Amino acid sequence: MIAIPFMFSVLLPTLIIVLPGLATAPESSSGGLGTMINSLPSNVRNELAGMTDQQVLVYIMSLYFFAPFFLIIPLMASSVIASDSFAGEKERKTIEALLATPISDSELFLGKTLVSFIPSMIVTVFSYLIYLTVINMASFKVFSGKLLLPNLTWIMLIVGLAPTLALASIGLAVMISARVKGFREAQQINGILLIPILALVFGQISGATILGPIMVAVLIGVFALIDISVFSVGIRMFKREEILSRLT
Amino acid sequence: MAPSIETNGLTKTFASVLAVDHLSLEVMEGEVFGLLGPNGAGKTTTIRMLACLLSPSEGSGKIAGHDVVKNASRVREIVGILTENPSLYERLTAYENMDFFAEAYNLSNPQEKQNRIRALLEFLNLWERRNDRVAKFSRGMKQKLAIARALVHNPPILFLDEPTTGLDPESAKGIRDLIESLSRYEKHTILLSTHHLEDAEKLCNRVMIINKGKSVVVGTPEELRDRIADEPVLKVTLTKLDNRIIDAVRGLEHVRRVSIDDSSTGLIITVDDTKSVTPEVVRSIVRADGMILSVNVLRPTLEDAYLKLVKEERT
């Protein structure tokens, strides 16, 4: 739960952005970014006009390259807790007493979701604040006192997209956890949920998709609809009897 | 008076396995009713259906008049359940476990909740250990805490599934004493599932022997023993035995058979009726100069009854 956020908020930004950005830029410093820059939409390329290679590196990497990684953080942070929600209780044989209480099915489902959602969002926001500090330290130097973050896209990403995406993923993970026998099985299946986000990462690197404000707003809408569907289906499919019949 | 627990043709099928087969029972308020049967007899499935954890495939179950399917939420509020496993959160302390379940059972008033938890933990001698993690508890302590958890919302009806299984004799006795006092002083209606005949014999007002999901017989432990008892038998132990004494007893009108037990100083006497014949037997032995150490009526135990009735059912 700590290693992935640390990697995306401190380690990789320091290695990829801060250190190269603060070093004296060689002539070909932006050469490695060539493919990404060439495939960027024209409006983003316009933002780069007049920037030095060093500034282009810091700008592109800080604002665009790392954005989808921050969607992985809430998924990774919640996957362990969400996978463990019902499957772990079955393994530890604590589920029967819980199911015997008068807590309603929807309360149980939502409770198990929130238990994963709250810590995952705390980790995500905290990671973002660290990332913001790291990036601004570099941009302050490279852009002569200008701070790159926060900007609109990142605020929408952290406040809107990350929570809606996390809720959809956690809802699915809790549903899976309720229907399998053990934690390992739940976590293996939940790993599949990362695939669409990884597609977004590769899309961003290749320039096929760029997370700008409009794109993020569309994704927030899409995931909000997915959240509603996941929760209505999840609560309808949540059956105490099925959970109990899958006891190991 | 309406029964506290009532089932009518209660049936549960898992795929092709018939776990509970048209089980009908009535448990009256304040009664301790035992479900007795071998492993896989359907005891746990019956309790799970009555606790609204499983839904019946057929038939109905009512708890204090509330249907277990139609009014499951209300049923869950008024029953406490000790599950087959203690089902406790081992990384939490005893107090935290109680607090969590008190909240789950809607005890929202903090003072009321605190008082109830304290009263239960003190009653079960766990108050001093309230801040210890459950993982450090012995099996007996966990079982006690699980019973405390089942009682946290003060339910009138308790389901206890194998409460003494896996416990050492001392802990098992502690749990039995506790169940006895819950029944005697707190007037809980208790449905107790067990395959420990000692539990049933000591605690239950009535027992139902079930096998392969079916009811074999219902009655008080006394009635079940009587059911398999063929003829009343007396055992008289003397300091010394001689032919004069044996002949004196054999000569009595209502004595059918007399034999000598393994110790050679005891007489096993089959009679028509123990109540009327015992004084005559004692008098005849004394007249024949016999020195009596003890007189016992030999009756089959609940274990004898259980084994015989389950065996009959199997054949």
Image (cartoon, grey):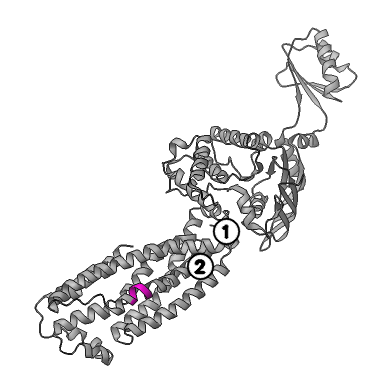
- Our reading of the magenta stretch's main secondary structure is helix
In this rendering, would B202 be left or right of B172? right
Q: How many residues crowd mark 1 within 10 Å: few (<14), some (14–19), many (20+)? A: some
Magenta stretch encompasses residue A159: yes
- Percent across and percent down for residue A53 are 14, 85
- Percent across and percent down for residue A1 are 34, 62
Type of residue at label 1? Leu
Q: Does label 1 lie on the same chain as label 2? A: yes
What residue is rendered at 15% in x and 89% in y? A50
In this rendering, would B294 be left or right of B257? left
Magenta stretch encompasses residue A116: no
- Percent across and percent down for residue B51 are 63, 53
- Visible residue check, residue B23: yes
Which element is circle 1 on? helix
**What span is in magenta?**
A156-160
Observer-nearest of B40 and A173: A173
For residue B13, above or below residue A138: above
Q: What residue sits right under mark 1 in the picture?
A: A244
> For residue B243, which quarter of the picture?
top right
Which element is circle 2 on? helix
Q: How many residues crowd mark 2 within 10 Å: few (<14), some (14–19), many (20+)? A: many
> For residue A35, which quarter of the picture?
bottom left
Type of residue at label 2? Met
For residue B167, above or below residue B299: below
For residue B31, above or below residue B57: above
In this rendering, would B294 be left or right of A70? right
What residue is rendered at 70% in x and 49% in y? B64
Q: Which mark is residue B30?
A: none
Q: What residue sits right under mark 2 in the picture?
A: A175
Mark 2 or mark 1: which comes first in sequence?
2
